[in-house]
Amino acid sequence: MVIAATPDVSFLIPAYNAADTLAECLASLQQQSRSNWQAVVVDDGSTDRTWEVLESIANTDSRILPARQPNAGAAAARNHAARLAAAPLLCMLDADDWLDPTFIENMQPVAENSSPAAIAYCAFRRVAPDGRLMQVEQPPILTGDVAKREFSSFCALAIHTVVFPRSLFELVGGMDETLQTCEDWDLWLRMAFSGAEFRRVDQCLAFYRMKADSLSGDPTKMVRDAIRVTSKAQALQTQQGLSAEGPETGWITPPVSQLRMLAWVVAAKLDPTLDVAALAALLPEMPDAAGYENFLAGVILHGLQTGLSTDRADDLIDVLDKWRPTFLLLIQLIQEHSLPGTGRKIIEAASWHISAANPLRSFTLGNVQVVSAALETLSRIPKAEPADTLIMHALSGGQHVSSFVGPFWGDLSIRAQIRLIMHEMQAEEHLQTPPTLVYMSSWTREALRGYRAFGGLIIRNGQRRGRLDRILVRIGRNALLACAPSDREDNDARLSDIQQNLQRGLAPRFRNPTRLRPYEKKGAAPVQSEEEYWEHIFERPDPWNYVSVYEQVKYAQTLSLIPEGIEKALELACAEGIFTEKLAQKVGQLTATDISQRAIDRAVERCRDHRNVELRVLDFVKSDVPPEQDLLVCSEVLYYMKDEEMLAAVCQKMAAAVKPNGYLITAHAHIRRDEPNRTGFDWDNPFGVGTIKQLLAAQADLALEETIETELYAIHRFRKGPVADPVLRVERHGTPLDADVAKHIIWGPAGTERGAAWTTEVTTSVPILMYHRIAEEGPAALQRFRTPPEIFRKQMQFLRRQGYYTVTAQTLAGLLRSGKPIQGRPVMLTFDDAYSDFLEEAFPILAENDFSADVFVVTDKVGGRSDWDAAYGEPAPLMSWSHIQELHQKGISFGSHLASHTPASAMDNEALLDEAMRSRNALQSRLGSSAESIALPYGGTDFRVPGILALAGYGIGFTTRPAKATFSDNLFGLPRLEVRGDRPLEAFPELMGLPGAYIG
């Protein structure tokens, strides 16, 4: 008789008709390296010899406490056992499972009855009905909110792998006895939301017996109970303010979690009589599974492997006929409620997972054909009838050397395989050269075709060996292709026929005329002197747009500071006399000067009716300033002094030119370099109004009398003589701002200068931001895809303030291909669908922040409406071709969004190639320039799409996968960060990796 000491761990064991397995279960406890345990075994109304077996064992071991109850279910039996338990720690063990001898030794020290409570959990292995040990199943790390997230979606732990405090079990109310399945999942969920800490023990210490008669239980009960648990999880999330937004957040919504359970149960049960449609009808909502394809493929495969007791994914190939009908039935069910193409992507993900486990195996699953090709013995491979996607593994000496994933058009002749191996897999070095006369003849023909290259090699010097090697490789490659067997039904021939047929239906190719940008001039001579510089500036009239509202308001404010009774006035840097003409009406005699003769000539013409105005050329830096002035006005020019020493000298000279009790008025802008902590212009001048004001105020005879302060500039009136307290007037600047002015403004507090970031920072990733509409109004269901203009303006100002500069798709492709670190802070701004509000709202805001953008056009819908959104309300208008052409001339880049806005994954190969070619041709014909970028509607890419886009002539493609683009990304599958209109403004800095940064 084994005598029980005070136990450290109590095992709660429900037993229902467990006569055959209970002894083995309890023996695993008796073999523990630590003996201070208790087993509370509750016979749950068994009808076999369970009670007799239990009594017999308990009579020899007082650590085993037997109990009985009428049949009430496992949850009730465990609650009964918990009430009888004597240990501070609990573990729930089923009567047909067992534990490793070191289970208590490893688990007890990790679990603690502390605050917060600590829960220990470990890995486990399933045991097949024939006794085979399956692979170790390692649970996830469940630290922090991860436990809440994981248990909100599924049961991440096997029931007997967990040791937890009894006090925690009592705190959360024990097990829910109304649940017939999933009761352990429900318990872990409530423990996670109670704040308990889950600690993983990285060992496999538990074993789970798989019984053919109970595998996956009752599907209806499991789905029904999963719905209850996930609904409870949603309520707990709401109560604690947690989010379940979708795959990009890591949280999985209840409908997807419920679909997950349904898919796993159907796959594991693998019962051809199971009514899957009736099971699906239990779900409160059948979700759109787009975005969860890889996830669901993994769930289904795990269910299949569990139900079929297979240890490796590739073992499923041997029983493909047994599970394929159920698999395809599940795919059909999911596809009926999801974005078109979702089912295809689940099939692809499952096929890749199976194939990756063993590249030596060939099989076909749905539209995917997996081919294993031994390079030593290539032979013709027929195309399976439903297949349009090829996964080809190249093997050399039995070792995997490369893979190809892409569209499938026809049979794989030996020539078609060699072309894929050479051009797509870059594995030609593993091909063997056939020692045949046919090959030698082909080699000779290819060599004769390349005689010019040989001749050039003979007459030129340097690096001959390397060039000769490259020529010989090319000749050998072409000869091998030329002599390989092929036919009119093979992959290459079928594709060539399709391309020729599609090309015939397209309009003539575009011509790309050479155009200069508006600011480019051929043969412009370099500027040599200050005078020549300013003459160059005034080559075109009014270079600074002084007739704009912004400048005219500033003029009016300046005039308001001029006192009455001014007889003699001097204006320095009068430019073309636009302000001079106004000033002349406020003073007796006015002398206006400028360094540029061109400017003075235009000023003379403008002021010819004002007889009190004298205009002349004057460089006031080098020359004397006319003295004895009642008023001196000098605005928007002192920035151009090369340093503070020169500025101080000029300020002294101007102060000296003012009579006693005379006035000096100056207006200058705030410049970020001068005042980095406030809104200002990003001009490269050494100082702005802040420094100019200080140096003028430092003049012994001058005193600041009145200031008009605006957000962008300040106007100061100094008096040469005593003054009372200075007057400050805060006023608004003129609006709207001209784009040429606005694009130089950085709004808000200190950030990062573009120039500074360019010289000090490099990056290996680029954020590509994805927008749709920039608008206030629209259907409520589409709020996510609609950013209000003022929010968009603040976002662009944020990017400007943080030193970002925009890159286009073409530039980005070059940067990523180069593989070299990228200077500064690049960002790409993309807009899908080409809505009219891009022209009306987005483009002006982009222009005022000195940003460009890429807009992706649904070419068949140009000038129409977004009818793909018709189910949600009135479709929004789209830009016309004339609008697109206008914006293209202004520097906006345009790419394809396909022709019809159909998801690429929903089209067959030929239809997708046709639409991709038509869309690209429409853009090139209308814009007169190359179109090489494409953003896929709904991000709907799959294994075939990159290859088809390359065939259509594109060079770069964008999806909706949420991440920054890096050098390792496929150029046709670049990720983008969605800027959602239903998120608060503060979410934008976080999206850019700058959480908490000021965004205004």
Image (spheres, rainbow, N blue to C red):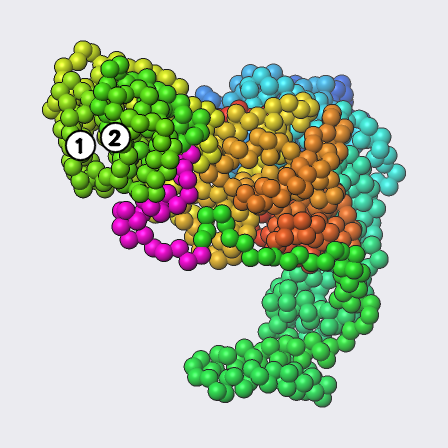
Main SS type for the magenta part? loop
Q: Quick one: which residue is furthest to the top in this view? A: 724
- Quick one: 145 or 12, which is closer to the camera? 145
* Mark pair 2, 1: CA separation: 9 Å
**Which residue does the image show at 73% across and 62% down from the upper left?**
371
Amino acid type, callout 1: Pro
Asked whether 201 falls inside the magenta stretch, the response is: no
Asked whether 531 falls inside the magenta stretch, the response is: yes
Residue under pointer 1 = 626
Percent position (x, y) of residue 804? Answer: 44, 40
**Which residue does the image show at 46% across and 38% down from the upper left?**
850
Snapshot quadrant of residue 820: bottom left
Residue under pointer 2 = 591
* Left or right of residue 632, residue 1000 in this image: right
Percent position (x, y) of residue 725? Answer: 20, 11
Snapshot quadrant of residue 169: top right
Q: What stretch is highlighted in magenta?
A: 522-545
* Left or right of residue 606, residue 426 in this image: right
Element class at badge 2:
strand
* Left or right of residue 486, residue 592 in this image: left
**Which residue does the image show at 71% across and 22% down from the upper left?**
228
* Left or right of residue 112, residue 716 in this image: left
Q: Can residue 119 be seen in this view?
A: no
- Mark 2–mark 1 CB contact (< 8 Å): yes
Compared with residue 395, is residue 129 higher up or lower down, i.e. above or below? above
- Quick one: 662 or 811, which is closer to the camera? 662
